Amino acid sequence: MCIAIFKPRKTRPDWKAYQAAYNSNPDGWGFAAAKDGKLIVRKGVSSFNNFKRKFYEYRHCPAVVHFRIRTSGEI
């Protein structure tokens, strides 16, 4: 089962929790962040460090972070 994490606005990302979630669900990641009245969506199947690099710009925004584990279909 995938993991979805809600991060409220102006709270710091819990990088250790995100890393643990990625380690348990390493088949993809994604996030949706609200910034300047827009919804920013990013996703990938790359490393945790790449996720962290992409998410860092939105670290102060409200966001939903998702880590995927393959249960069926393509990765």
Image (cartoon, rainbow, N blue to C red):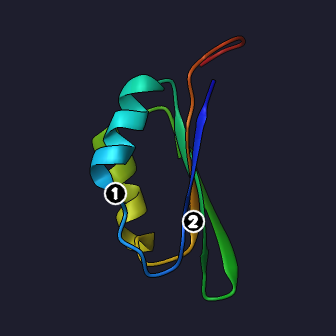
Query: Which of the 4 image quarters holds residue 70?
Result: top right
Q: Which residue is rendered at x = 45% and y = 71% of the image?
A: 58
Which marked residue is nearer to the observer: mark 2 or mark 1? 1
In the rendered image, which residue does mark 2 sit on?
Answer: 63
Quarter of the rendering occupied by the N terminus: top right
Q: Which residue is rendered at x = 72% and y = 13% of the image?
A: 73
Tag 1: amino acid: Asp
Q: Is 13 placed above or below 21 here?
A: below
Residue 26, x across and y down, in percent:
44, 25
For marks 2 and 1, give the CA distance: 13 Å
Tag 2: amino acid: Ala
In the rendered image, which residue does mark 1 sit on?
Answer: 14
Residue 63, x across and y down, in percent:
57, 65
Q: Answer yes or no: is residue 50 visible.
A: no
Q: Residues within 10 Å of mark 2 (few under 14, many from 20)?
A: many
Query: Which of the 4 image quarters holds residue 18?
Result: top left
Q: Which residue is rendered at x = 69% and y = 87% of the image?
A: 37
- Foreground pick, 65 / 57: 65
